[in-house]
Image: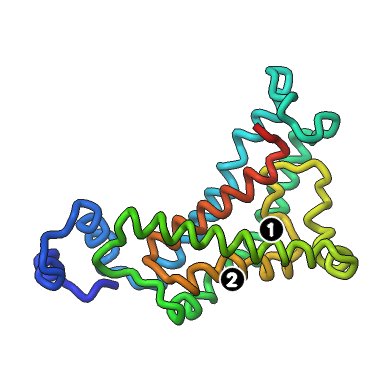
Amino acid sequence: MLPFDTIEEAATFMGRNLTVAETMWFKYSAKKSDYYLYCHNILFLFLIFSVVPLPLVFVEMMRSLGFDKYKIQPKVSLSLPEMFKCYKDVMRMFVLVVGPLQLVSYPSIKIIGIRTGLPLPSLWEIVAQLTVYFMIEDYTNYWIHRFLHGKWGYEKIHRVHHEYTAPIGFAAPYAHWLEVLILGIPSFLGPAIVPGHMITFWLWIALRQIEAIETHSGYAY
């Protein structure tokens, strides 16, 4: 929630007029709590898990159009009912684990200093922070993934993620509940080390999930 009642007050505080983006942000967020803004991630994740994999479903169903040459496992495929079952499994995990985790994790976001106020970050700041986030996530995720592919980690946790032997976009977030929690650490570390604005955090979470879906698409273009 912004500590200003009017745009004029915000402009006086910043010593300049608000940009178009800042004016839009003020009108949307001025009277909304920081917790409410943070919980937007629940809607964003639901939309990403539901919509982003759909073009990959089309590609899988239309392999005769020439997409086969890009498929990593050309002899392995899933039927439409199998993909829908995967989506239902992901939504079950979303309702039971991911959603509740978002609802209760706001204090950690407050502690690390994710801000919601004005001014908004510049494009350069957003790009720089996202670059750092991706680098930190990639490095830490690699080592966690190696642990999960060890004997104990695989048998107790990671095997669930590989129940769908043919990679598809819907299966990207499909995992054991403990793996969902563990793999949240690499995504959290970047913003914890280099905290930014809530808009940057939203963008980071969205891009990270889109990247995961593309990685699990089963295709290499």
Residue 96 can be seen, yes or no: no
Give the residue type that dot 2 points to.
Answer: Leu
Q: Residues within 10 Å of mark 2 (few under 14, many from 20)?
A: some
Image x and y of residue 74, in percent: 81, 29
Give me the residue at 84% from left, 34% from top: 76
Lateral position of residue 89 relative to residue 74, left or right: left
The residue positioned farthest toward the top in the image shown: 65
Q: Between 45 and 100, which is closer to the camera in this rendering?
A: 45
Here the colouring is rainbow
Q: Between 78 and 138, which is closer to the camera in this rendering?
A: 138
Give me the residue at 71% from left, 28% from top: 70
Placement of 163 over or under 184, stated as above or below: above
Image x and y of residue 180, in percent: 68, 65
Question: What residue is shown with label 1?
Answer: 92
Pointers 1 and 2 in contact (C-beta within 8 Å):
no
Label 1 sits on a secondary structure element that is: helix
Quarter holding the N terminus?
bottom left
Placement of 170 over or under 158, stated as above or below: above
Q: Which mark is residue 155?
A: none
Quarter holding the C terminus?
top right
Residue 26 can be seen, yes or no: yes
Give me the residue at 33% from left, 53% from top: 123
Q: Earlier in the sequence, mark 1 or mark 2?
A: 1
Question: What residue is shown with label 2?
Answer: 101
Q: Quadrant of residue 5?
A: bottom left
Lateral position of residue 43 relative to residue 184, left or right: left
Gap in Å between the C-alphas at discs 1 and 2?
14 Å
Lateral position of residue 119 relative to residue 54, left or right: left
Label 2 sits on a secondary structure element that is: helix
Placement of 167 over or under 123, stated as above or below: above
